[in-house]
Image (cartoon, helix red, strand yellow):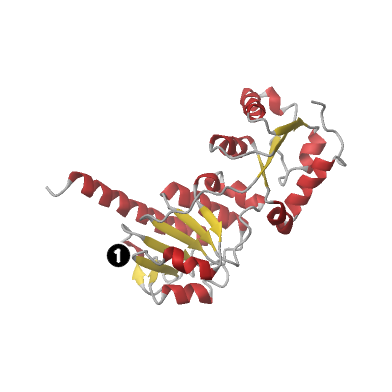
Amino acid sequence: MREIASLNNSHVRRVQALLRSTRRRLREGLMVIEGLRLVREAVCSAQKITWGFYTAAFLADERGVALVQQLQELRCLNWQVTPEVLSALSDTESPQGIVAVLPPPQLPLSSGPGLTLIPDQIRDPGNLGTIFRTAWAAGVKQLLLPPGCVDPTNPKVLRAGMGGDFYLPWRRISWEEISPVVAEDEELWLAEVRGGIAYDRVDWSGAVTLIIGGEAAGASRQARELAAGQHVYIPMARVVESLNAAMAAAILLFEARRQRELFHNLEETGPR
C-alpha cells in the first residue's frame, strides 16, 4: 500500500476533524488513540479498529512490526504515513509513530453486586482519564458519566486512562437514567471534603455506588439529591483545602477494594 504523504488526504482530514471536535466524534461514533501502548491495549482487548496509521520509523522496532502485523491480521484499513502526516494526526507534541481510529467501547453494564462509580462534573481530561485507570485497577464494576463531565473520548482522557476504558464498562448517561441503574445498590455515597462518615468506616463490601464531585464546583444538585445526605469524607489536616478529584477517587476506591478482598477471603475460609 502506498505511503500517505499529503495532508490533504481525505482520511487525514477526517482524523484531524475527529481530534478537534467532540460533536464530530459523537456524530461519527469514532475516537482517536495514539502510541504503541494504547493501540496495543485496544487490539488486546478485542476492540474493532477502523483505521491505523504508522511511520517507517515505527516499523524499525520489533514491537512496532508486531503491532502493525496484528492490525493487518484484523483486516482494518491501515497506511504507512510520513512523519509530517503522523504529526498532523497526533494530539501530542512528540508523536509515538502510530495512530488508530476506532468506535468507543460498548461493554455491557452490570446488574450484579459490585462498586459503581459516578464521576460528576469532572471537567479536566487528565483527571477523568486517571479516574478511568484507577477504577479499572481497583475493580470497579462500571462507570457512569452524567452530563457535565468532559468527553470520555477526548484524546487527553484516553491517554491518561491508558486503556482503562477498553476494559471497564462505562456509559454517558442522564441523571434520569442513572437512578434505576443504581436503585438496587445497598448504599450510595457522595464524597465530600468534610462532613459525613470517614471513608474507612463505610462498609464497601456489598453493592455500592460512589459519586465523586468535580474539581471546581463539587457535586451537582442532581448528585446531592440522589445521595440524600449519605456523605463520605477523607480525614485530612485542617490546613489542606481539598484533594484532587482523581487522588480522592484513588483513596476511596482502593479502600473499597481492600474491604471487598477481605470480605471475599472471609467467605472462602469461613469462621475459624
Residue plotted at (58% across, 70% down): 216
The answer to whether residue 59 is left or right of residue 189 is right
Q: Is residue 49 above or below residue 202?
A: above
Q: Which quarter of the rendered picture does the N terminus lie within? A: top right
Q: Nearer the viewer, residue 217 or 179?
A: 179
The answer to whether residue 137 is left or right of residue 43 is left
Residue 247 in picture, x, y percent from top left: 48, 57
Residue plotted at (54% across, 34% down): 44
Q: Nearer the viewer, residue 196 or 209?
A: 209
Count of labels in the image = 1
The answer to whether residue 33 is left or right of residue 189 is right
Q: Quadrant of residue 125?
A: bottom right
Three-letter code, disc 1? Arg
Q: Is residue 45 above or below residue 154?
A: above
Residue 113 in picture, x, y percent from top left: 35, 56
Residue at image mark 1: 201
Task: Mark 1: give few (<14), some (14-19) or many (20+) Cα within 10 Å.
Answer: few
Q: Quadrant of residue 20?
A: bottom right
Residue 258 in picture, x, y percent from top left: 33, 51
Q: Given the current orientation, which residue lies at the most extreme left position? A: 272
Residue plotted at (53% across, 69% down): 175
Mark 1 secondary-structure assignment: helix
Residue 242 in picture, x, y percent from top left: 49, 67
